[in-house]
Image (cartoon, grey):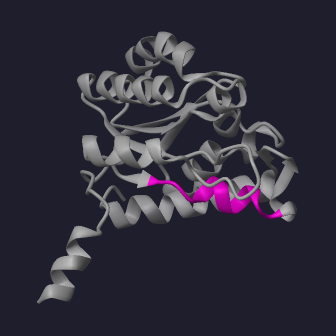
Amino acid sequence: LLVLFLAACDRTPTLPKLDSHDVIVAFGDSLTHGTGASADTAYPAVLASLTGLAVINAGVPGDPTASALQRLPAVLEEHQPRLVLLCLGGNDMLRKQPESATENNLRLLVQTIRASGAEVVLIGVPAPKLFGGAPDFYGRVAEDMGLPLEQDIFNDVLKDNRLKSDPIHANAAGYRVVAERLAEFLREAGAL
């Protein structure tokens, strides 16, 4: 019984099942945009083909969390998503912004998305250093706000030179891995 209880505690928060007409918005920076690959091989395009759902690519290269907060309401208004894949924080780290500011902005982004009626999946970005991994603030935001968190995808892809176009971006093969793992993550969370 204890093993079952512990396994249940470790489970990803669940998401409501998406209908065929529901829209997913991939909201982020260059990793969402697909820098290092073509538009049709960026992870949102591949995820759309894997799931059969509309996945809007709302990735803006170079976008830190502060400016993402400014553009988010218009994206939500235009696309009215049921689910937002939130992948930001890398540019804050590259610009050496205080982690507390990035964490606070991520919380505000999540609150804004939820206020629109959409669900959120938080995607962690590795710190730009050797053996970086996603910083602890992603876990804190996910735990405090009850969010599904995928913090390993980009860390795993960007550690494999075969999956990278440059030190901080994936290539087409890398974005395909991201999309496949996100599709599996969404299935496990109950969205697909």
Can residue 65 be found in the magenta stretch?
no
Image height of 39 relative to 5, above or below: above
Image height of 101 relative to 43, above or below: above
Q: Which residues are magenta?
A: 150-160
The residue at 61%/22% (across/down) is 64
Can residue 151 be found in the magenta stretch?
yes
Which quadrant would the C terminus be assigned to in this image? bottom left
Image height of 14 relative to 188, above or below: above
Residue 154 point in image, percent of width and height: 64, 53
**Farthest residue, direction left:** 1
Residue 123 point in image, percent of width and height: 50, 46
Image height of 30 relative to 13, above or below: above
Instruction: Count every numbered label the image shows and give the total.
Output: 0
Q: Relative to 136, is 80 on the left or the right?
A: left
The residue at 86%/61% (across/down) is 161
The residue at 86%/64% (across/down) is 162
Q: Relative to 109, is 157 on the left or the right?
A: right
Looking at this view, is 146 or 101 the one in front?
A: 101
Residue 19 visible from this viewpoint: no
Which quadrant would the N terminus be assigned to in this image? bottom left
Residue 31 visible from this viewpoint: yes
Looking at this view, is 28 or 131 the one in front?
A: 131
Residue 179 point in image, percent of width and height: 60, 55
Q: Relative to 25, is 133 on the left or the right?
A: right
The residue at 64%/35% (across/down) is 90
Residue 180 point in image, percent of width and height: 59, 62
